[in-house]
Image (tube, helix red, strand yellow):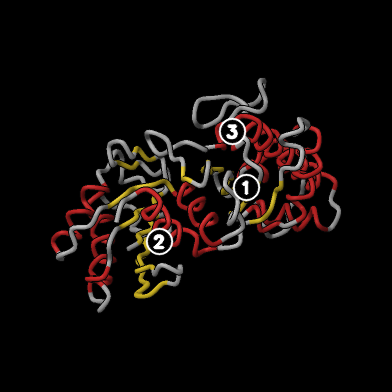
Amino acid sequence: MAIDIGGTKIAGALVHPDGTMTATTRRPTPRGTDAEAVMAAVAEVVADLSGSELWSSAVRCGIGSAGPVDTSRGTVSPVNIGAWRDFPVHARIAAELAARGAELPTVLVGDGVAMTAAEHWLGAARGHANALCMVVSTGVGGGLVLNNRLHPGPTGNAGHIGHISVAFDGERCACGGHGCVESIASGTAIARWALAQGWTPGEDATAAGVAVAAGAGDPIALAAFDRAGRALAAAIAATATLVETDIAVIGGGVAASGDVLFAPIRRHLAAYAALSFVKDLQVVPATLGTHAGLIGAAAAAAMLLPG
């Protein structure tokens, strides 16, 4: 059983051992309301799943959530779900399952870790014992697989590459640090920097618009993506040097820019990943797209729970 909680939607599915999904369902994430109203939407997703004839066949449950998360306490405080601060989502979902006759072992992971589990199981990191997977979108998150095992860390935040500092004198990040990858390479940061440098957008003033302009040869747009690619390359190389990953998988909305993003990452990576044991590091796009959240929640449950 998989539940994926984000700022836009709350989704659920029953996931088979081969990764196929049945009984998929979703609800919009309530906005401008209280914590219980958001939980009510989660409960509706669980109720939908319980109507499946396969409900009694579920052996474990994985919950993937936008963060920050604290898996040691079972709580979440998603930046884009304002009503939830230190919300005990793990215990509440476990109670919903039990009330419907499914007292399952349940695990909570952040969305970056869920995406990592998905890409290692069925996606671009499949077959790699040591991998870094990343989501580059409104924010920058990620997760690690080490020795073929998901490595979420004590609170579920290991691999959170977006808050590695790559610019010592860089601007202050929302996390409180300075020069973080997220403050340079997120979609929001790319658009903000391009506008500050004098880029004139058409109808789309987002990172997607910057990507279109870069593809057309706009020098400011190209510089914005080169800057983002350099920040990502530095962080990827640092991570690989520390724990010897041999592949970095990048998904998320900004990664949809294709070579506009991947070309500068790979170009700068050649300078940062110079040691013999990291110089062959691959950087590739994620392959599971919008399915990664649910597949990843199920994969994390399989990797982290017995049964």
Q: Please tell me which of labels 2 and 3 falls first in the chain.
A: 2
**Which quarter of the figure has residue 55?**
bottom left
Q: Amino acid type of disc 2?
A: Lys
In the picture as drawn, the residue positioned furthest to the bottom comes out as: 53
- Residue carrying label 1: 187
Above or below residue 257? Residue 132 is above
- Residue carrying label 2: 9
The crowd level at tag 2 (other Cα within 10 Å; few <14, some 14-19, many 20+) is some
Q: Residue at x 22, y 57 (%)?
A: 104
- Residue carrying label 3: 243
Is label 1 in a helix, a strand or a loop?
A: helix
| Residue 173 position within the rendered picture, expressed as x and y whole percent measured from the top left | 55, 30
| Residue 82 position within the rendered picture, expressed as x and y whole percent measured from the top left | 35, 45
Q: In front: mark 2 or mark 3?
A: 3
Do the CB atoms of the residues marked 2 and 1 lie less than 8 Å apart? no
Q: Nearer the viewer, residue 260 or 24?
A: 24
Q: Please tell me which of labels 3 and 1 falls first in the chain.
A: 1
Is label 2 in a helix, a strand or a loop?
A: strand
**Which quarter of the figure has residue 154?**
top left
